[in-house]
Image (cartoon, grey):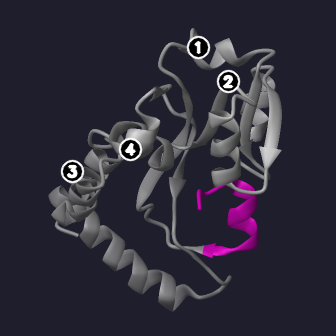
Amino acid sequence: MEWTAERGQQLGFVPTPFYRVGGTAAVLKDSKITRWEDLKGQPVCTSQGSSYVKPLTEFGAELKAFKSSSESLLALRGNNCVAAVHDATLINPLVADSPEWQNYRAISPELNPAPSVIWTRPGETDTQAKLDTIVKGWHRTGWLIDAEKRHHISPPSPALVELHDKFQAAGA
C-alpha cells in the first residue's frame, strides 16, 4: 500500500520504500485517449477507495467505482467505460502479456505516483528496523529490479534504479 501523510499518522511503517507506483489507464488501442486530460467528461472505471479517485475527479472524469479491480476491468471490457485506472503493476503486465488484453494499451506517465512501504502497527520500531535492513538489501543487490523484469511490470522503474544506486554506493 502506498504511503500517504494520513496513513503515516495512523500506522507504523518501514522507512525505506520498496517501490514507487502510480496509476495507469487501460484503454483500447484505437482509443483517441493518449493523456490524462483526455478523460474529461468520459466514464472511467476504478476501484472504490482508490487513491486515484481524487486526481481523476480533478481531470473531470466521470467515475464508476467498483468493489474490486477485476469488476472494474470487466466493466471496461464490456464497454461500460473508456478506461480503467489501477496501479501500473496491474495494468502494464496485463496489456503486455495477456492475449485477452491484446487490443488494449496503457497510458503514461503514471498518475499520482507514491512510495510503497511495508506497514506495521504503530510503535513496532524493532520490526520496522529489521525489515528496513531487508528492504535496503533488496535495493543494494538489485533483487527488486530483477523481480520487476521477471514479471514484466515495466522497464526498470526509475525509483528502483535510483534506490539501487543509492544503497549499492552506501554498501547498506
Q: Amino acid at mark 3?
A: Asp
- Judging from the image, what secondary structure is the residue with disc 1 in? loop
Specify whether residue 27 is in view.
yes
Q: Say which of marks 3 and 4 sits in front.
A: 4
Specify whether residue 52 is in view.
no
Q: Say which of marks 1 and 2 sits in front.
A: 2
Quarter of the rendering occupied by the N terminus: bottom right
Q: Mark 1 sits on what residue?
A: 33
Q: Earlier in the sequence, mark 1 or mark 2?
A: 1
Image quadrant assignment for residue 131: bottom left
Q: Earlier in the sequence, mark 3 or mark 4?
A: 4
- Judging from the image, what secondary structure is the residue with disc 2 in? loop
Q: Mark 3 sits on what residue?
A: 165
Q: Say which of marks 2 and 3 sits in front.
A: 2
Q: Say which of marks 1 and 3 sits in front.
A: 1
Residue 88 position within the rendered picture, expressed as x and y whole percent measured from the top left:
49, 43
User: Eyeballing the image, is 79 above or below 97?
Assistant: above
Q: Mark 4 sits on what residue?
A: 98
Disc 4 to disc 1, C-alpha distance: 21 Å
Q: Amino acid at mark 1?
A: Ile
Circle number at residue 100: none
Q: Amino acid at mark 4?
A: Ser
Q: Mark 2 sits on what residue?
A: 82
Residue 85 position within the rendered picture, expressed as x and y whole percent measured from the top left:
63, 37
Disc 4 to disc 2, C-alpha distance: 19 Å
In the image, the segment drawn in magenta is 1-12
Instruction: State yes or no: discs 1 and 2 in contact (Cβ < 8 Å).
Output: yes
